[in-house]
Amino acid sequence: MRPKDIIADMKTMYGIQVMYSKAHDALQYALSLTYGTHEESFKLLPSFAYILEQQNPGTITDLQCADDDTFLYFFMSLGSSIRGFRRCMRPVIAVDGTHLKGRFGGTMFVATAQDGNEQVYPIAFGYGDSENNLSWEWFLECLRGALGHIDDLVFISDRHASIEAVISKVFPYATHTICCWHFGENMKKRFHRKDVADIMDSAARTYGEFNYNRHMEELHRLHKGAFEYAIAAGPHKWSRVHCPQRRYRLMTTNVAECINSCLKFARQLPMMTLAEFIRNMLQKWFHDRHAAARSMRHQLTDAAPLVILKRVEKCNYMTVNPVDWNIFSVKLKGNQWTLNLHLKTCTCNKFQMDHFPCSHALAAARERNLDFTSLCADYYKRETLIDAYSVPIMPVGHPSSWVVPSDIASRVVLNPKSKRQSGRPMEGRHASSSERTTTQSCRRCGQSGHNSRRCSNPPMVNEGPSISVPDEYRRKCSICHSIGHNKQTCPKKDSTVE
């Protein structure tokens, strides 16, 4: 519901024209009646955090206030999510920040993983004033306290300077990588070339050193500046083949962006109401996904066989030559790969990087009549997915039913000092160049894809009006009433004067 929707409804139903400001105030009043006010929300936040921890064992919360009791930060990580990530998820976390649209603004921080069924698996949420070094350091320290030490941990983020600086400080044992989609968008914006961004994306996603070098050589031929930009950013940051740890199939922060999209409406709600909205959303997700996982009829998750089917199609054209019981040589169109089914490795690198069988491994397994499931890591199996969602997320109930210690209930939390900027807030973020639905058109040459400032084409020749104007709108002479001239240039002007 938006103010303009209220204006339209009042006009249609009652024939009353309502000003935008009045419709806006009415909407805010209705939201406060439904979800509470921001002042009440900050006041109830300590009690909410206490009840959340009591109802959901293992949950970690952290509420930080300034010396004058004004709100600074709030962190929330549910015990079910922490347990599920540590036991069942690939150790890859996407972190991102998004703007809050409420009265006091601020930023929401998100840490998200992906389960074996390629579904978003939220781990932690944080709320602060803005994306800066202090806020990111606080959020990541809370995340480290909730998760503990995770072997082979990988973070994926955009190229925000604060994230990169803080991760190396808070998680010195982890590997920080950048989202290849955001990196490609930065290249498009910097060099105004979509083709170089596409080649860079191919170089980032490839599994082999040979293909990586081939793509980078092509990038160097097309645009030397883009090549130098990619090298300066560090291939170990954006390239799968040069990453010190496994990124599996997670090359972007899309899982974190999905969470932001799910909370598009909720980001305008008061703080405690937003936290409860997230808890309720995760409660439903855990229930529905646990039931769906239990109903799966095969040993793998529903998403895993779809990937296997695509890779099995290539097996029909491969020649498999056994070396011993576990080692095979696989050939296809002049190329050759060596794989080891016992060690689960292949010279194409997909097998060991994804912990998921490549097409060469599937061809060898079929030669030995082995079950494909035995080649997949536990991350992609049905039982692991059931375990990830086996602990339900419990509700907190209505605030009137809460039993909270007096020292927590009496804690004062005031509104944050930061206020929203003047003017109407944006409904969404700025679209990137690849997301724009309109195409630029040059008024100099008439072609699309650029504007007149960047036009290097010759100007188009004006061959006359392209739109026919009806006679009643064309110039007409007041003397002879003909079309195409006026009385000043009328040939009958002199004869009329005489």
Image: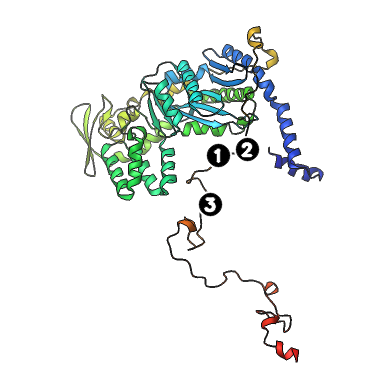
Image quadrant holding the N terminus, namely top right
Q: Pick out the residue farthest to the front.
A: 67
Q: Which amino acid type is shown beneath numbered disc 3?
A: Thr
Q: Residue at x 54, y 20 (%)?
A: 75
- The residue labelled by disc 2 is 425
**In which quarter of the view is residue 57 placed?**
top right
| Residue 282 image offset from top left, x and y in percent | 55, 24
Q: Along the line of sight, which residue is nearer the eye, 345 or 101?
A: 101
Cα separation between marks 3 and 2: 23 Å
| Residue 291 image offset from top left, x and y in percent | 52, 24
Q: Along the line of sight, which residue is nearer the eye, 330 or 476?
A: 476
Q: Residue at x 76, y 42 (%)?
A: 19
Which secondary structure lies at badge 3?
loop
- The residue labelled by disc 1 is 429
Q: Is residue 90 visible?
A: no
Q: Are marks 1 and 2 in contact (CB under 8 Å)?
A: no
The mark lying in front, picked from 1 and 3, is: 1
Q: Which amino acid type is shown beneath numbered disc 2?
A: Pro
How many marks can you see? Answer: 3
| Residue 138 image offset from top left, x and y in percent | 50, 21
- The residue labelled by disc 3 is 438
| Residue 207 image offset from top left, x and y in percent | 31, 36
Cα separation between marks 1 and 2: 10 Å
Is 314 on the left or on the right of 388, as rendered?
left
Cα separation between marks 1 and 3: 17 Å
Q: Residue at x 56, y 18 (%)?
A: 393
Q: Are marks 3 and 2 in contact (CB under 8 Å)?
A: no
